Image (tube, grey):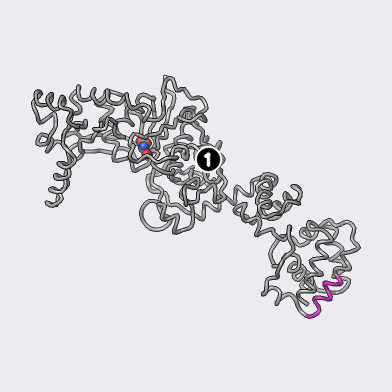
Amino acid sequence: MTKKVRVRFAPSPTGPLHIGGVRTALFNYLFAKKNGGDFILRIEDTDQNRFVEGAEEYIIEALNWCGIRCDEGPSASAATADQGKYGPYRQSERKDLYRKYAEELVAKGKAYYAFDTSERLDYHRKDHEAKGKTFIYNWHNRLKLDNSLSMSPEDLKKRLDSGDDYVIRFLTPPDEKLHLKDIVRGDIEIDTNILDDKVLFKSDGMPTYHLANIVDDHLMEITHVIRGEEWLPSLALHKELYDAFGWEAPAFAHLPLIMKPVGKGKLSKRDGEKGGFPVFPLSWKESEGYREAGYFPEAVVNFLALLGWNPGTEQEIFSMQELIESFSLERVNKSGARFDPDKTKWYNQQYMHQKEDGTLATSFIQELKNKGIDFISEDYVKKVVGLVKERATFIADFWNLSDYFFIAPKEYNEKAAKKQWKEGTSQIMQDLVNVLEPISDFSSENVETIVKEWISEQELSFGKVMPPLRLVLVGDMKGPHIFDIISMIGKEESVNRIKNAILALG
Ligand code: GLU
């Protein structure tokens, strides 16, 4: 029987989740759902020095906003949390279980106690540096350092009894060629002699990331570890740890980095500050998030999915369900994925076009209320939204695109006025008022027919009537079909705006 797929997203609550982290969570989620498996959120908070208040809540809120639902995890939002079998899901709440695993490795001769003080290790580091070398705690010097391998059992007992601080280090087996497999990167060979004896258990009684991560992945029956490429250097140690415990290792997939829009290196907070785009899903302190910048979560999920995953077709727009159906780790690219802020906007536009006018109107009404405009019917706002949404990227664009549907222009674009308001224009506009006033059916089509008939009867050119008319109604030369505007704002308002313009422009 094949095992049920179980994957985990294992962030450390050391700050806000970068969108690269959201992508890792997303790929885990897509893979789990594609394979009928479970997506687990595990909070790796063993490093109390780096703990940041509010970070865990932020992570959970960000995943929820994106529609990435956890099957198991620390929050109440986890749908089918089986806390009994696999929980708790915060490593700080599991801290009592790790020591026994570290001791188990010591008992098996796969790990050892090391008493070297940090001053001593610093001394070795500096001494090596001065000689142009790097200090690595491993096979070539471990017998000369202060650990259980370099002392007699009697001395060891004394040291342990005396309460001296110690850590537990992994005893990296020398002279081995490790053959590692990664679903994205293929086969990787590592010579164990270049590895250091990593600390597994710290003197403060807490496990390090490596030990806690492996123990938890094993206990939580994780089948696939999908994480960022920055963890690839840890893969050798992790594989060694599985072997040392005699446990079956999960499959590994290391996701490519998300790269800066230009130049080398991975996307950073500074790139966002320089380029004026968010790098966090939600705002964090003074950094604006995608949510607050007006992005739809579907757009964020869609662009993140295509950063490093290639569907193998031309399709660019994917709903979460379509992503689940199409996703595979085999189609994740090896090379870094370049971040393109313009493309994120393009995605938002696409989702804007797809959204129901009613849904967009609900958000826009809120903005209108904030501006003190609360006398407008929902139906009216819905129509406005329908007329301008093709040109909008964000809900926040609606006001600039459609203010004239709600308030008369306070001024007229100077350049346009110069060009459109000529001698005789006032008279034409006055005549137009006389044409509009008796019309009772003020539908766009009817007004258009009547005005166009009048233009041809009077042998006026369109150019003499329509551009100045747009200018006086809108204040500028922008906007949708002019008769749609006239019909929407209505007869009284249209006539008032024309009369005001005659007074203002002369
Ligand atoms: N706690 C690690 C992190 O912050 C998890 C890495 C992993 O997935 O193994 O990303």
Residue 503 on image: x %, y %: 79, 74
Name the residue type under label 1. Cys
Residue 349 on image: x %, y %: 59, 52
Q: Is residue 500 magenta?
A: no
Q: Is residue 86 above or below residue 332?
A: above
* The residue positioned farthest toward the front in the image shown: 162
Q: In this figure, which residue is indicated by the disc labeled 1?
A: 66
Q: Please name whichever residue, 73 or 206, is drawn nearer the observer in this view of the structure.
A: 206
Total marks shown come to 1
Q: Quadrant of the N terminus?
A: top left
Magenta-drawn segment: 423-431
Instruction: Tell me the residue at 20%/28% (across/down).
Output: 111
Location of residue 40 (image quadrant): top left
* Dominant secondary structure of the residues highlighted in magenta in the image: helix
Residue 276 on image: x %, y %: 48, 57
Q: Is residue 178 left or right of residue 428?
A: left
Q: Quadrant of the C terminus?
A: bottom right
Instruction: Tell me the residue at 68%/64% (across/down).
Output: 478
Quadrant containing ligand 1 reads top left
Q: Is residue 182 above or below residue 415?
A: above
Q: Is residue 424 magenta?
A: yes
Q: Secondary structure at mark 1?
A: helix
Can you tell me whether the CB of the residue at mark 1 lies under 8 Å from the nearest atom of ligand 1?
A: no
Q: Residues within 10 Å of mark 1 (few under 14, many from 20)?
A: some
